[in-house]
Amino acid sequence: MALCIIVLVGTPLAFYLARAPGRLVLLAEAVVLMPMLMPTLALGILIAVTYGPAAPLGRAFAAIGITLANTPAAFLLATIYAALPTYVIAARGAIAQVPQEYEGLARTLGDGLWAARLRVTLPMARKGLAAALSLAWVRALGEFGIILIVAYYPAGMPVQLWTDVQDLGLQAVFPLVAVFLLATLPVPLWLSLRARAA
């Protein structure tokens, strides 16, 4: 779910960062970069303060039945905050490498702006976008600091590994590490092979 939201929100934002003129883009890029530059535990504390039960946003979500602390919804929120900037920055680079003139040619042939981007730019940027999605996938699955603060329960795989190491020791967590690697590695490898084959 997090990756679907990240792609739906992050791809238009990556297009904006790659294509829009003006100084406002610099501000938008700074906002996107900020979560990547902050220690994840500090970011988790800020998210907890912003979306926690006592915060105005937290109360607004609670009014519609969504609790954003130690719930699956909080886990989703933490994962999006962790992986969205990684996807946006990598996708922006992939989109920026496609010459804008190709979009212009598609528009002279009758496509609208977003039709040209969907039919021309995205296919030409597919390898970079596959890499962006792979990075976001690994970042989302591997996030520890934010989830430790915002969504300790239900525990994500990294938090569960940390808990098991504390309780059982290193030797006992090897089976869970194997499961973690089996969950993490196939998607990036598949995306990379698909992008190269297409």
Image: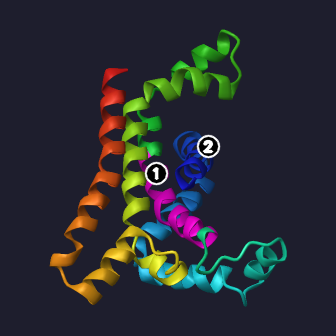
Of residues 108 and 123, which is closer to you in this image?
123
Q: Position of residue 107 (x, y in %)?
A: 66, 17
- Side of 142 relative to 87 (left or right): left
Q: Residue at x 54, y 61 (%)?
A: 80
Q: Position of residue 116 (x, y in %)?
A: 62, 22
Precedes in sequence: disc 1 or disc 2: 2
Please provide the residue range marked out in magenta: 73-90
On the rendered image, what quadrant is the C terminus found in? top left
Reading the image, the residue beneath label 2 is 12
Splitting the image into 4 quarters, where does residue 112 fall? top right
Q: Is residue 19 magenta?
A: no
- Side of 182 relative to 63 (left or right): left
Reading the image, the residue beneath label 1 is 87
How many numbered circles are shown? 2
- Give the amino acid at mark 2: Pro
Splitting the image into 4 quarters, where does residue 49 fall? bottom right
User: How far is the residue under mark 1 from the one under mark 2?
Assistant: 11 Å
Q: Position of residue 168 (x, y in %)?
A: 24, 85
